[in-house]
Image (tube, rainbow, N blue to C red):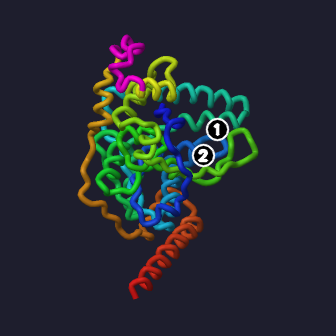
Amino acid sequence: MGLDLKQLCVRERTNLESFASKVVAIDAYNAIYQFLSIIRGPDGLPLTDYNGKITSHISGLFYRNINFLSLGIKPVYVFDGRPPSLKSAEIQRRKQVKKDATIKYEKAISEGNYAEAKKFAQQTSVLRDDMVEESKKFLALFGIPSIQAPSEGEATAAHLTTTGKAHASASQDFDSMLFGTKRLVRNFTNSGKRKLPNRNTTIEIEPEIIQLDKTLTELGVTREQLVDIGILIGTDFNPDGFERIGPKTALKMIKDHGRLEEVSQIQDKLEEIDYKQIRDIFLKPQVIDVPEIKFSDVDYTGIVNYLTKERSFSLDRVDTSLNRLRKALEKKSHNLEQWFV
């Protein structure tokens, strides 16, 4: 579902170039789901290799990370662990959405409506365990580190920013703000031109950065109060939220009363949810401490062999992209040598 804090956060336009030389902790599941959703054929089905195995996520990781590394960005991918038990209702809701979308997709295909079919197909993406392992091994070929979080990946990504290991965390979800990230970057892994569904036009998706301190100051609330606002709106751990309470109403309630327990008109509903546990999920999350984030050299030969021999990628396209990366890294290395000379 995702937390609807868009109206309240102070969002500022940025660009990928501004993250050069900076470590960015990426919510891996969020990014890979985007690749699985967006990178599809005309019939809406994901890309596959000669053996019928899905390659959309590998394609997304390949081209996006070449872009990151060429710009001097240092990405680190944080993978989800075991979800909190309170997330079970949201997980079931997502499964039902996928089932409904599958039915609608098959109906659209049978009617020859491929534009509609592709729209519904994007909602059916499933990230399997084998895809997660493939992604980690592929990232290792790029010298890009992966971190296995004990629970929510966003929480550990946020923790990396508060401990100074990362400049920002990257995700489409605003939950990162409740987990305490110092800086949240949205549209980081999907920036660029995108075709609008059912329309012969494209739009430019630009990255945006949200600084937690700036948002809290603008709203006049604490992070603890922001978590209470999130609970009122609805989080992954209480997806229904509170009826007829949107972001602006939630903000007013918390600013007027201070905390959930003091908002008289919600007390009956408040007794039905474990709001204290939800608070703890965000304010005392399960995270892993990383003493150091280590990057390695790009294994060009390993990437070529994996993509072309195992996953049916075009050798010409792979070579062209890797040559662009090699030239960009060589140029940066040369400029660095000149600086010290």
Which residue is farthest right?
Answer: 200
Which residue is farthest top?
Answer: 268
The residue under the point 64% across, 53% down is 193
**Mark 1 and mark 2: Cα distance apart in space:** 8 Å
Quadrant in which the C terminus appears? bottom left
SS for dot 1: helix
Query: Amino acid under label 1?
Result: Lys
The tag earlier along the polypeptide, 1 or 2, is 2
Image: 322 above or below 242: below
Q: Does residue 285 appear left or right of residue 50 in this picture?
A: left
Percent position of residue 66, x then y:
50, 63
The residue under the point 42% across, 30% down is 230
At label 2, counting other C-alpha atoms closer than 10 Å, the crowd grade (few under 14, some 14-19, many 20 or more) is some
Q: Which residue is mark 1?
A: 118
Image: 139 above or below 284: below
Query: Amino acid under label 2?
Result: Arg
- Asked whether residue 91 is in view, the answer is no
Q: Which residue is mark 2?
A: 40
At label 1, counting other C-alpha atoms closer than 10 Å, the crowd grade (few under 14, some 14-19, many 20 or more) is many
Image: 183 above or below 297: above
Percent position of residue 267, x then y:
36, 13
The residue under the point 47% across, 61% down is 19
> Magenta residues?
256-272
Say whether residue 329 is magenta: no
- Of 256 and 144, nearer the camera is 256
Percent position of residue 176, x then y:
40, 42
CB within 8 Å, label 1 to label 2? yes
